[in-house]
Image (cartoon, rainbow, N blue to C red):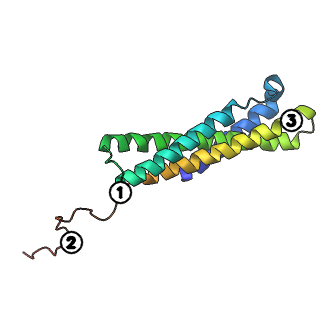
Amino acid sequence: MSTLVVAALAAAAVAWLLISTNDLFYRISPLPWTGAGVLGVLAIAEAYLAQNTAARIERRPGALPVQPLAVARFAALAKASSLVGALSAGFSAGLLIWLLLEPTKEAGSSVPTAATTLVTAIALIAAALWLERACRVPDRPDREDDDSDRPTPRR
């Protein structure tokens, strides 16, 4: 979790520096909505995958068994997505703060886009962390013939 916070803070600082020193915003204004859309779709997909994976690992009634390699891939996807979400959230937060402090009309018109991108990036982080948690192996054995709870004989 601390890695995500550091990544978000670094991305916010980079966004602030890029925007405030190079007049970069005025070259790309207005901000595109595609970033928010892509992050939102990824967040929804990963939330669905987390719910499905948790049900399959816990072997809920009606859930198909899950392949171990698929769970490893889902965990890698969750790690990567949480980092992408943190970088996107940090960059959007730095941009949003700059936009709120900038008194121009162009900056004011881009605030909703930056705010929506920030919200969808946070949603992606939450979905990725949920997916990562769903990929964990349950603590208790689910097999009845498992005798791991028996006391071991002393030697």
Which label was assigned to residue 109? Answer: 3
Rendering quarter of residue 144: bottom left
Q: Which residue is mark 1?
A: 61
Cα distance, mark 1 to mark 3?
Answer: 50 Å
Give the class, few, some or many, for how many residues have Cα within 10 Å of label 1's Cα (few <14, many ≥20): few
**Does residue 145 sit above or below 44 in this rendering?**
below
Q: Is residue 7 visible?
A: no
Task: Name the quarter where the C terminus is drawn.
Answer: bottom left
User: What amino acid type should be assigned to the residue bearing mark 3?
Assistant: Ser
User: What amino acid type should be assigned to the residue bearing mark 2?
Assistant: Asp
**Does residue 91 sit above or below 153 in this rendering?**
above
**Mark whose residue sits in front, 1 or 2:** 1
Q: Which residue is mark 2?
A: 149
- Which of the marked residues, 1 or 2, is nearer the chain's N terminus? 1
Secondary structure beneath label 3: helix
Cα distance, mark 2 to mark 3?
Answer: 63 Å
* Residue 38, horizontal then vertical, whole percent: 62, 34
Q: Is residue 100 left or right of residue 78?
A: right
**Residue appearing at x 18%, y 64% in the figure:** 146
Tag 1–tag 3 contact (CB < 8 Å): no
Tag 2–tag 3 contact (CB < 8 Å): no
Secondary structure beneath label 1: loop
Secondary structure beneath label 2: loop
Q: Is residue 148 left or right of residue 94?
A: left
* Residue 14, horizontal then vertical, whole percent: 70, 37
User: What amino acid type should be assigned to the residue bearing mark 1?
Assistant: Pro
Q: Is residue 140 left or right of residue 33?
A: left
